[in-house]
């Protein structure tokens, strides 16, 4: 049996971290099984679905590396939904309801205040034809519900283990709106049947939907697929994803936060599993180690600081040829491999390189607190041409002459050369700054005086 899975976002907003995790995990599972990954756009809600969100979802998935094998849009499949609806109506599994949203909300409140669960009371099933006619005469249009069998519903979830519901504890789901549009539940089940989906992977907020879906699969003459419900992620403090984090779209992570896609993939592919979260520059280890048995039912925490640490680690190991195009796009066209190798260990985000570029090319504001020492050091600068050994030759000579060592020796030189107290290895940086600028910076105190 070929594994076939789908990621089914609604194009009603930008792709955010929570959904991206579902997408990536679904994709990793498919790849680990040599399976097939369908991107299904759930765009039955014509008012809220927007082409720009669909484009955003696609570009975010490509950026993340979760490329789909096939794509489908629910809006193109109305004819198939009509067929399913016809069958269910003929079989008596759909029934017309006439309550307004206000009436339904009142019912729910009454049930809750008398301590009852807010389950739809099925009063529409009691309506006579005459009553229905009266409603329609008043201009009311029916919405339709799927009639659940009041019997146990069970499945063996790949993360949650055995799950049990009773049909009688659930509201009959609304599957067709007043305007005739079929809704998510039915469309999703019909698609999962038509596209031969073998595993439905989604957030645990869908667990009770799944119970209803199991009966819909059967009512439509199909065997339900396997189900996998992932726990939802929370923020670093364990709360529900806060507005700030919850609204962290992939486009913001890419464009504003400058996160490398493999940093996010390294985090989202392992979050909530028993495998360690490590920086991976390649997706293959995440595929090879993938197994639903490693996922815990607990709520994993999404920690932006961890994402930044992974991002830095990935940059530190990235070879020049993987970034040169992006560096050129930043306007750093003459930045070569030597420069990249000298500073990459000091980057947290790729654009940090601009700071080191400026340090090398100048102008910088040298910090010289001990002018005599710097003067002595300047006089000892080795002859050109310089080599990778120049820094150690120079500092050895300065050490001999002044008796300084360690921080006393290096910090004033760093501050004079870069204006900063930290930064890339000076042995490398000295060569990037070059003899002319080095002299100029060491002498800047004198000039300023
Ligand atoms: N469009 C639904 C959602 O985004 C799909 C859920 C599913 O995977 O069935 O929640």
Image (tube, helix red, strand yellow):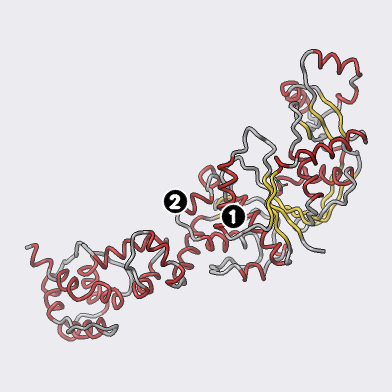
The quarter of the picture where residue 379 lies is bottom left
Q: Is residue 83 left or right of residue 47?
A: right
Mark closer to the chain start, 2 or 1: 1
Q: Position of residue 200 (x, y in %)?
A: 76, 53
What residue sits right under mark 1 in the picture? 61
What residue sits right under mark 2 in the picture? 256
Q: Quadrant of ligand 1?
A: top right
Q: What's the residue at 70%, 58% (across, down)? A: 37
Q: Position of residue 134 (x, y in %)?
A: 84, 13
Q: Nearer the viewer, residue 137 or 410?
A: 137
Q: Position of residue 5 (x, y in %)?
A: 73, 56
Quadrant location, the C terminus = bottom left
Q: Is residue 12 left or right of residue 138?
A: left
Mark 2 vs mark 1, CA separation in Å: 17 Å
Rendered view: 438 above or below 39:
below
Q: What's the residue at 74%, 32% (across, down)? A: 181
Is the shortest distance between ligand 1 and the CB of mark 2 under 8 Å?
A: no
Q: Position of residue 117 (x, y in %)?
A: 79, 33
Q: Would you say the residues marked 2 and 1 are in contact, meaning their CB atoms lie under 8 Å apart? A: no
Quadrant location, the N terminus = bottom right
Element type where label 2 sits in the image:
loop
Element type where label 1 sits in the image:
helix
Rendered view: 123 above or below 168:
above
Q: Mark 2 or 1, which is nearer the eye? A: 1
Rendered view: 79 above or below 364:
above
């Amino acid at each position: 049996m070929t594994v076939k899975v789908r990621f089914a976002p609604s194009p009603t907003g930008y792709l955010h971290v929570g959904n991206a995790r579902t997408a990536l995990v679904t994709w990793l599972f498919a790849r680990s099984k040599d399976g097939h990954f369908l991107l299904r756009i759930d765009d039955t809600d014509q008012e809220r679905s927007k082409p720009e969100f669909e484009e955003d979802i696609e570009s975010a998935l490509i950026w993340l590396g979760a490329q789909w094998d096939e794509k489908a849009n629910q809006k193109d499949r109305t004819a198939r939904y009509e067929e399913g609806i016809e069958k269910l109506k003929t079989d008596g599994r759909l029934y017309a309801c006439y309550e307004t949203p206000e009436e339904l909300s009142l019912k729910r409140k009454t049930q809750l205040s008398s301590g009852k669960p807010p389950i739809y009371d099925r009063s529409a099933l009691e309506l006579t034809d005459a009553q229905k006619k009266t409603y329609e005469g008043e201009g009311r249009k029916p919405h339709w519900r799927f009639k659940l069998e009041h019997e146990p519903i069970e499945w063996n979830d790949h993360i949650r283990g055995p799950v049990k519901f009773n049909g009688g504890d659930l509201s009959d789901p609304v599957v067709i709106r007043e305007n005739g549009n079929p809704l998510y539940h039915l469309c999703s089940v019909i698609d999962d049947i038509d596209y031969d989906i073998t595993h439905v992977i989604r957030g645990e907020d869908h667990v009770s939907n799944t119970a209803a879906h199991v009966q819909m699969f059967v009512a439509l003459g199909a065997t339900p697929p396997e189900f996998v419900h992932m726990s939802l992620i929370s923020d670093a403090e364990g709360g529900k994803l806060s507005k700030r984090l919850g609204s962290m779209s992939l486009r913001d992570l890419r464009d504003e936060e400058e996160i490398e896609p493999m940093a996010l993939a390294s985090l989202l592919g392992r979050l909530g599993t028993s495998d360690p979260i490590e920086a991976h520059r390649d997706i293959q280890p995440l595929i090879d180690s993938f197994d639903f048995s490693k996922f815990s039912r607990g709520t994993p925490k999404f920690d932006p600081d961890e994402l930044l640490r992974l991002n830095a680690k990935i940059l530190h190991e990235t070879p020049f040829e993987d970034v040169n195009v992006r560096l050129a796009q930043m306007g750093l066209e003459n930045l070569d491999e030597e420069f990249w190798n000298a500073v990459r260990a000091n980057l947290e985000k790729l654009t940090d390189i601009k700071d080191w570029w400026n340090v090398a090319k100048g102008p910088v504001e040298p910090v010289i607190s001990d002018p005599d020492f710097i003067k002595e050091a300047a006089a000892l600068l080795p002859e050109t041409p310089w080599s990778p050994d120049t820094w150690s030759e120079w500092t050895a000579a300065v050490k001999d002459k002044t008796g300084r060592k360690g921080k006393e020796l290096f910090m004033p030189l760093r501050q004079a050369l870069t204006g900063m107290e930290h930064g890339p290895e000076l042995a490398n940086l000295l060569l990037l700054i070059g003899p002319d600028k080095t002299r100029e910076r060491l002498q800047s105190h004198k000039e300023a005086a």
